[in-house]
Image (cartoon, helix red, strand yellow):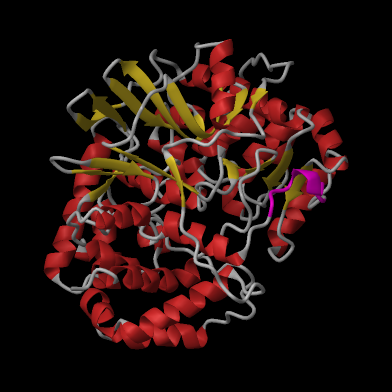
Amino acid sequence: MKHKEILYLSSESKLDFQSFFDGYAFFGIDLVIGNQGFQQLSKKTDNRDKYEDGNYLLIERQDNESYQLSRDYHGYYPIFYYQSEDYWCISNSIIYMVERLKEQGRSISFNAPNVEIWKSHLAFALQLTSHHTFVNEIKVLPVNSDIVITKDYANSDIALVKREPSPKYKQSYREALIECLEVWRGRYLTILANHQMGLWHDLTGGLDSRCLFSFMVNHLVMAKDANHNGRLRVNSNPKHTEDFKIANRLVSLFDLSVNAKINDDYKAVKVPASESYAVWKYFNIGRYAPIVFPLTDFSPHYMEMGGEGGGDNRAFYLNQSNSKYATLLEFIEKRYKRFLSTEERYEDWISQIEKACFELESDSQIDISILHYREFRSTCHTIKNPKSRFKLAPLGSKYFDRLSQLSDEAALQSGQVLYDIIHNNCAELLYIPFDKPEKAMTDTNIKNLSDVMVNTPTEPGGIYWSNDEAVSDLFYELPIEPISDQTTSPLQILHDKALSSLHSNHDLIEYYFGKPYIDFFQEKFDTTDFRNSGQHLHAKGSFLHALILIEFLSDFKE
């Protein structure tokens, strides 16, 4: 898995394999990295679930004429598709798809509301908001769907099909809790026991990361060894003083240390600024607006884990700004309608969101605001750099999702699932205050705590990988523009290109964003402290994403 490689599968592609895997995943408590790792596991066993936790694409032969394309349970691996009468293509990059379609002389058009909404700086619109993209002909694969590819001697076609249901049998909450504890204890054991693996593990003063920390201290002897020998960093930011204070208090209970240095042997290789910028552009334009650059290539020896996914089971949108909204559509209208310049554009945008909501609600009873958050914001926000970072989000896993599906709304909103996990892993962690008093257990939480008996794995799972991954014909190396100044940063490259776009594309900025945004963007340049921003700008740099999108559209002006 290399971050410079872009998936591009089309009706012209030759498929002559039984299976192909890209990315990484836990199958049970076995960790698989890359296609060769998957093939190694497949030789050992075929007893595995189809949709597991990780960030991966899987293509499997169904019969002589068809293949099925699926991916990880949460849909972290981005997949976009294009389909016309005589041609189809699938990729993990919208930008690359458009460039290839343009080379072939195929007609494409731009979705005005899905261009304009990228000018918003608010959370709901900092990533994709529906299964439509800024290109009318390119769609997002819904997380509850796979793609079946049919190829025979004369024809080739694709069709979306619903995923197989998971789990295949009914569970009680207690059964799901036991399974979640057993599986994730086993997965932490697999990581901590392997001396070829370094782990960066976030810890704050909040509930989400403490829940994950409880899995670590469940294997305290191995965690200490890894922490003291340069394989485990319990990471907490000293600038966030309350978080840092609580994190130090937590680790001191277990003779661990915060921010221990991980040995350089585990770390990924840093890449040139031009490569970092190109990877960001091809995987994030039209997908995720906050500016977070991939500064290193993917390394199978350096994993990151954090509290991402914790918001998957809370009403994130409807509880914003200290005022509760009755519905997701009310929330959108009151907070986002102002970003669309005409009623027609707003109605088109809302219609696309409603179609996505209908798709998501078709096989789930969870509130649509939570489903939408999970499908779009959580997915993109967790995997900011889809091909560059070895990132796992246990709270976004199918095992935590099952617990949420078996909880009522009051339990979801109160964090009962997370308290149950901590209580069974290491109850002492519940005695330490959180960063905010309202995160402490209520009397109802205490009354409803579930005690379960868990068969904790005593042997780690296997890790299947190869340091010499074979090149696949399904991937193409993304274009990287050479730069003369080798000391520059990807942020400086982005700054210069976005500023150039602002100066040369007044007509497009006015058409898509409105004339006032010419001055607005200039003011953002004037007031943003680029010099002291470090390597990333995060959400406050989303205006740069909007300008690079405009620059991309300018190549298609008649």
Is residue 336 visible in the rendered image? The answer is yes
437, 113: nearer the viewer: 113
Say which residue appears at 24% left-offset and 25% top-offset. 150
| Residue 262 in magenta stretch | yes
Residue 330 sits in quarter: bottom left
- Give above or below for 355 relative to 167: below
- Give above or below for 31 relative to 550: above
Q: Please provide percent x and percent y for residue 15.
A: 36, 27
Say which residue appears at 26% left-offset and 76% top-offset. 513
* Image quadrant in which the N terminus is located: top right
370, 79: nearer the viewer: 79
Say which residue appears at 18% left-offset and 60% top-offset. 109
User: Number of callouts in the render?
Assistant: 0
Q: Please provide percent x and percent y for residue 185.
A: 66, 25
Q: In this view, does 511 lie to the left or right of 382?
A: left
* The residue stretch that appears in magenta: 261-269
Q: Please provide percent x and percent y for residue 299.
A: 65, 43
Q: Is the magenta stretch mostly helix, strand or loop?
A: loop
